[in-house]
Amino acid sequence: MYADGFRNMTIGRTLWALIIVKLILLFLVVKLFFFPDILKRDYESDYERAAAVRHNLTSTPSSP
């Protein structure tokens, strides 16, 4: 893509702006509704959160 092409765009700039705004909104909605902060919900302090993460990272998975 050439720099001249981007400088002379009129409708393209508006479309790119719409695409960027749409992507930002999409990621915000997905993060809010589909990826809740489980550690903050289940544990009260940073120490408890760190201990839970440490335990999950160091424990061996049980076989099925």
Image (cartoon, rainbow, N blue to C red):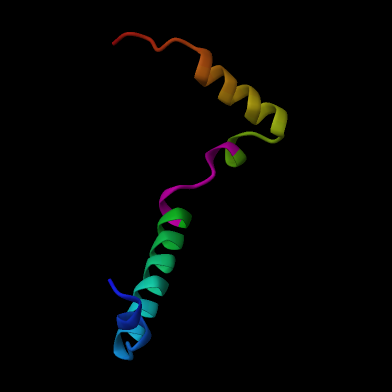
Q: Residue at x 57, y 36 (%)?
A: 39
Q: Position of residue 63 (x, y in %)?
A: 32, 8
Indicate whether 43 appears above or below 60: below
Instruction: Tell me which residue sits at (27%, 71%) in the image.
Output: 1
**Residue 42 coordinates in the image, percent (x, y):** 59, 35
Number of numbered labels in the structure image: 0
In the displayed structure image, the side of residue 54 where residue 19 appears, left or right: left
For residue 14, which quarter of the picture? Answer: bottom left
21 horizontally vs 37: left or right: left
Of residues 57 and 10, the one drawn nearer to the viewer in this rendering: 10
- Residue 43 horizontal/vertical position (percent): 64, 34
Side (left or right) of 12 relative to 56: left
The image shows residue 61, relative to residue 29, as above or below, that is: above
**2 or 25, which lies in front?**
2
| Residue 41 sits in quarter | top right
In magenta segment, residue 38: yes
The quadrant of the rendering that contains the C terminus is top left
Residue plotted at (64% across, 27% down): 50
Q: Is residue 10 left or right of residue 56?
A: left
**From the viewer's perspective, is residue 32 above or below residue 57?**
below
Q: Residue at x 67, y 27 (%)?
A: 48
In reply to whether residue 60 is colored magenta, the answer given is no
Residue span colored magenta: 33-39
